[in-house]
Amino acid sequence: MLDWLRRRLRPQPVDEKADPARLAAIGDEVAAKLRATPGVEERGGDKAELFLMPGFLRPAECTRLIDLIESNLRPSPLFSDKTGTGARTSQTHFFNAGEPEVAALGAKLDAVLGLERRQAETVQGQRYDVGQEYRHHCDFFRLERDHWQTERRRGGQRTWSAMVYLNSVEVGGATDFSELDLQVQPEPGLLIAWNNMDRNGRSNRKTRHAGLPVEAGQKYVITQWYRMEDWTRSPR
């Protein structure tokens, strides 16, 4: 009995690619920068660090990004589908970082968050048609899953997520943060940014969220994930 208790109480080794101390420090720095930015609203309460910034993009920027999304769409990928077939039914465009509009978008996101472009995954754009959705999920990587062994070599744990709506949706399409009792309605240029970790640098399941089904019209959104370290397409 005592041996079992000692094993339970023994500190568990820390994966250096998901080091809570480093993740907590990143979270503190970004949250402090956002709190000091005029026009930013904090909406996560004491459960999560989540911020809204209306007017992050101008209407003309949104229109141009929608045009780029429409130029090359494919079914949106998933690392795994544990919630059943159809968990994510949108279509995705992977932006070319060399395009002027994409470079400008990346620089703007980095500046408001205080993060580096080298930590950023490829910028994505999604289109949701009527009936399409992304069921409740978290953006952080679960270290017990098989894909973590690849992702830890591609920049480690995800830190912050950023989403920008590019249009209004006729009916439906809100982003539902069920644990925060928060639904965000799409509006052109609105930025949502949240820390996928809690204040101790551990995965925060309170950030669980869903893109609710579009009931009329279409939804266009930008998604950007940042890593703890430099992101790379090919595992090191």
Image: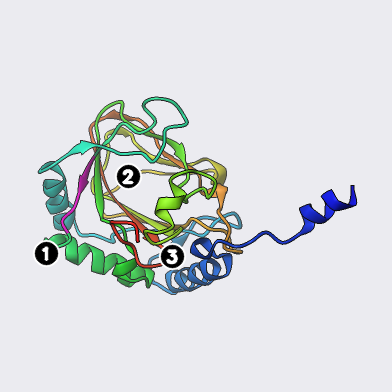
The 10 Å Cα crowd at callout 1, few under 14, some 14 to 19, many 20 or more, is: few
- Label 3 residue SS: loop
Which of the labelled discs sits on residue 228, or is there none? Answer: 3
Residue 106 position in % (x across, y down): 25, 64
Residue drawn at x 53%, y 58% is 197
User: Which of 47 and 172 lies nearest the eye of the viewer?
Assistant: 47
- Marks 2 and 1 in Cβ contact (< 8 Å): no
Lower position in the chain sequence, tag 1 or tag 3: 1
- Marks 1 and 3 in Cβ contact (< 8 Å): no
User: Which of 47 and 188 lies nearest the eye of the viewer?
Assistant: 47
Q: Quadrant of the C terminus?
A: bottom left
The 10 Å Cα crowd at callout 3, few under 14, some 14 to 19, many 20 or more, is: many
Q: Amino acid at mark 3?
A: Met
Q: Which residue in the structure is indicated by mark 1?
A: 100
Lower position in the chain sequence, tag 2 or tag 1: 1
Q: Which residue in the structure is indicated by mark 2?
A: 186
Nearer the observer: mark 2 or 1; the answer is: 1
Residue drawn at x 35%, y 30% is 213
Residue 117 position in % (x across, y down): 29, 68
